[in-house]
Amino acid sequence: MTREPIAILTAGLFDDHHAKTAHGVIRYGSRGIVAVVDERHAGRTAAEVVPFCARKVPIVASVADAAGRGARTLLVGLAPTGGKLDAGLRAGVVEAIEAGMDVEAGLHTLLRDDPELVARAERHGVELRDLRVGPDDLEVPGGDPPPAEVRVVHSVGSDCAIGKKVVTLELDRAARGFGRRSVYVPTGQTGIAIAGWGIAVDHLIADYVAGAAERLVREGAERGDVLFVEGQGALFHPAYSGVTLGLLHGARPDALVLAHKAGERTIQGRSDLPLPPLPELIAAYEAICRPIKAAPVVAVALNTSALHERDARAEIQRVERECGVPAGDVVRFGPEPILGAALGADG
């Protein structure tokens, strides 16, 4: 990681789901965050605007304000569709470099590929760090299974941007709270910004996604014996299904936890594509894993943020009846029911 303390740039979109990098780092990260840079919400705190963040990080109007609070690194906190560095974000990056701040970004547009940004960084003696760049020596998977004593639990989704990362992080945190040697395995740029390691698999050559997943599981096994692998994309999303399948086949999990946003009826960005019923999704995920390694869906983790509490509890009960596995909302009602199912006989 680059220097602390850090500021997080969201460019007027802090309350939008595209600011999930900012939200995740604030809620789960251990680094010192002095400010969020977001002119539209300046004067408030992160928790006031997005209660999920759970930390009273001040929101300021400019990079200069963040620098005045002692920020030494600027993290781009947005994950825009397509992952490109637009003009608004670029202006913030330039301002940070000119203020002598390192810059981290998890975009598909790499900072290191921008000659002007590189020249500015060299002139001011600061570092540009691209979180989505993977190792140079990745290969296709070799077929080496995880150590027998390691349990691999993989969070998968009915759709994109519904909370797979949150489910994974909450389960890992809860497992460690119970004394387990648990490891969160990051597979995307936000997870890397939180945990300080991992591979953003959606930026890789397609042939190497499964190999990256295999490597991540091996590295995770050196850190602990219960691995919670963060899912990416969704099996039936026409834009992002490839990375989902690569992770499943490379990680070869022992169990799956299906994340779903309650109330959603169609695939994100595709109103013409209805979401399959949850039992059909469960059957599809299990079938796609079976030829490589059987991995049952042991629980459904619901995102009930759009429902009132009574409706949320009723939906959890309905899903349990429909799917025949435990269900719950790990943020709203706690991760214990999902964790117990995920750990299974190891629990």
Image (cartoon, rainbow, N blue to C red):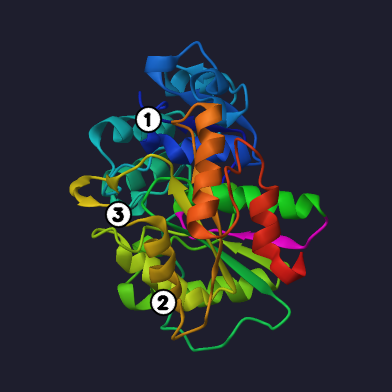
- Neighbourhood count class around disc 3 (C-alpha, 10 Å): few under 14, some 14–19, many 20 upward: few
3D distance between C-alphas at marks 2 and 1: 35 Å
- The residue singled out by tag 3 in the image is 113
Left or right of 306? Residue 148 is right
Closer to the camera in the image, 185 or 121: 185
Task: State the quadrant of the C terminus.
Answer: bottom right
Which residue type does callout 3 highlight?
Asp
Instruction: Answer with the quarter of the image where residue 217 lies.
Output: bottom right
Q: Is residue 166 magenta?
A: no
Outermost residue on the top side: it is 43
Is the stretch drawn in magenta largely helix, strand or loop?
loop
Mark 2 / mark 1, whichever is N-terminal: 1
Q: Give the tally of numbered discs.
A: 3
Residue range highlighted in magenta: 179-188
Residue placed most toward the observer, 60 or 90: 60
Mark 1 is surrounded, within 10 Å at the Cα level, by few (under 14), some (14 to 19) or many (20 or more) other residues, namely few
Q: Secondary structure at mark 1?
A: loop
- Residue 305 or 141: which is nearer the viewer? 305
Q: Residue at x 67, y 51 (%)?
A: 337
Q: Which mark is residue 16?
A: 1
27 on left or right of 42? right
List the single residue furthest toward the left: 272
- In the rendered image, residue 45, in percent from the top left (x then y), is placed at 55, 18
Closest to the camera, between mark 3 and mark 2, is: 2
Q: Which residue is mark 2?
A: 287
Q: Nearer the viewer, mark 1 or mark 3?
A: 1
The answer, for residue 225, to whether it is visible in the render is no
Q: Above or below — where is 196 with respect to 304?
A: below
If you read the primary sequence from the N terminus, does the residue marked by circle 1 or circle 3 appear first?
1
